[in-house]
Amino acid sequence: MQTLAVLLQAGAVPMVAWRHLASIGDVHAAAVVERVDEGVPLVAAIEAEGGAWRDLAAAWEIATTVGAPLAEVLRMIAETLRDAAAAADDVRIALAEPAGTARLLLWMPFAGLLLGFALGFDTLGVIVGTPAGAGCVVAGVLLVLVARAWTARLLRRARPEAGTPGMQAELMAVALSGGASIPRALHLVAETPATRRGDDARIRSVLELSTSAGVPAGELLRASAAQDRHASRIDGRMRAARLSTKLLIPLGVCTLPAFLLLGVAPLLLSVLASTPLPL
């Protein structure tokens, strides 16, 4: 994206810039050029790449509509997306350790079952040949499945939301930089394929502050967007920290009882079955 901005700033027309990128092996640029050659509009071709490219498509559409300089807009969007990606990476790294530990512990009950076989106990005979052994295995497997679903749900809730924090404010700043009025800028941003919504009230408060304080709205909007990304990074780290504690709940409620049912109970039943009754 930064390379695309440099090409545009050097005077290349948009499609020539995209074709230059495709020629040096950029797979996204090649896909965009291929769609355009098939008759797809450029903005729709960019949006079809998904993810952060939808944000680029939104910025591109607004910039071309209001006449904002594309090169400058692309530089700004590239910096925004890099910042958002760095924040998302921080959250993923923070989540990696508790997530890996949780997945490892889910195998603990089956490790206990294998331990019985390794020690030479007739746990298979107990499991297959006695109702108590079969019941322990069925209950243990059910608890493991519950623990897996519970853990997966906790991990999903701890992950960051889809989309780029603050992108709506960035798009509003793009629209205003091209000379659009505030009502028109709001309308344009509302119709773009941006990936994250729900910041309307905050944007309006920033615009009100700009009007009352006499400060350029674009700078305030970009500052608000940067603050949103910072808040998203802190919130993600806090969720990751809380996740370590929350994962103890399925561990205590499901995984440890499953270990007892699959690993310990068959061993005890095997010992009892092999012990001769006193005369």
Image (cartoon, helix red, strand yellow):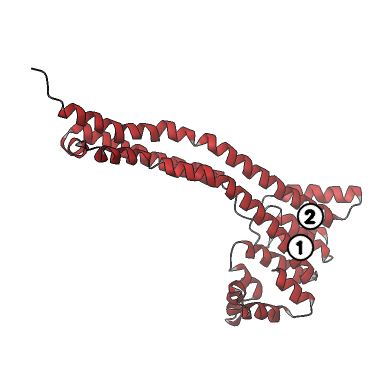
Residue 165 visible in the snapshot: yes
151 with respect to 206 (left or right): left
Specify the quadrant that holds the C terminus: top left
**Secondary structure of the residue carrying numbered label 2:** helix
Q: Residues within 10 Å of mark 1 (few under 14, many from 20)?
A: some
The image quadrant that residue 138 belongs to is: top left
Q: Is residue 5 above or below residue 244?
A: below
The residue under label 2 is which amino acid type? Arg
Residue 33: where, in percent of width, then height? 61, 78
Q: Residue furthest front?
A: 119
Q: Residue at x 72, y 65 (%)?
A: 59
Q: Residues within 10 Å of mark 2 (few under 14, many from 20)?
A: many
Q: Camera-side residue: 194 or 228?
A: 228
Residue 162: where, in percent of width, then height? 60, 53
Residue 124: where, in percent of width, then height? 20, 39
Q: Is residue 40 above or below residue 238?
A: below
The image quadrant that residue 64 belongs to is: bottom right
| Residue designated by label 2 | 222
246 with respect to 277 (left or right): right
The residue under label 1 is which amino acid type? Met
| Residue designated by label 1 | 76
Q: Residue at x 44, y 44 (%)?
A: 103
Give the number of callouts: 2
**Secondary structure of the residue carrying numbered label 1:** helix
Could you give the CA–CA distance between mark 2 and mark 1, rounded to whole angstroms? 10 Å
Q: Is residue 192 above or below residue 33?
A: above
187 with respect to 123 (left or right): right
| Tag 2 near tag 1, CB within 8 Å | yes
Label at residue 279: none
Q: Is residue 81 above or below residue 252?
A: below
